[in-house]
Amino acid sequence: MDSTSARGSHFEGLAGAYLERMGLEVVDRNFRFGHKEIDIVALDGETVVFVEVKGRTGGTFGHPGESVTREKMRRIVAAAGAYLRRRGLTNRPCRFDVVCVTLVGDREAEFVHIRNAFGA
């Protein structure tokens, strides 16, 4: 994978498959609202889950979740509000999760799923 975009798509694909294995239903990917983006939108029962995906190859630069800044959280919350309004889901409960994907070796991925990582 050469480009940042290709790496991001790869990590998002791995995270989406992981979430589905955990029983969530992935309903949208890469939702954009202006310059804001939500990587994955999933349903956990009636709850709309907005997922930020962070990935790393190896542990050289620290834990992937450490790169979710307050500014990033603010942007995700703003995009989530737009998503809920556009889809007519403003009456549904929602939460914000972070899925960290670390590639170990050539084919193995480790996942850390942080449920309710931050609030609106």
Image: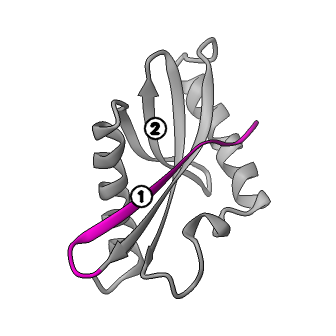
Relative to 52, say whether 56 is above or below.
below
On-image quarter of the C terminus = top right
Does residue 25 belong to the magenta stretch?
Answer: no
Q: Are marks 2 and 1 in contact (CB under 8 Å)?
A: no
Q: Which numbered dot is residue 41?
A: 2
**Element on which disc 1 rests:** strand
Amino acid type for the residue under numbered disc 2: Val
Asked which quadrant contains residue 88, the reply is top right
Mark found first going from the N terminus, 2 or 1: 2
Quarter of the rendering containing residue 101: bottom left
Q: Is residue 88 left or right of residue 78?
A: left
Outermost residue toward the left? 107
Please state the extent of the stretch shown in magenta in the rendering.
Answer: 105-120
Q: Residue visible at 57% across and 84% down?
A: 61
Q: Position of residue 98 (x, y in %)?
A: 56, 51
Position above or below: 65 against 52: below
Q: Dot 1: few (<14), some (14–19), or many (≥20) neighbours within 10 Å?
A: some
Left or right of 47? Residue 16 is: left
Q: Given the image, on which type of amino acid does mark 1 rest?
A: Phe
**Residue at 58% over, 26% down:** 84
> Label 1: which residue?
111
Residue at 63%, 11% (x, y): give it.
Answer: 91
Provide residue 85's location: percent of width, then percent of height: 61, 23
Residue 36 appears left or right of 20: right
Q: Residues within 10 Å of mark 2 (few under 14, many from 20)?
A: many
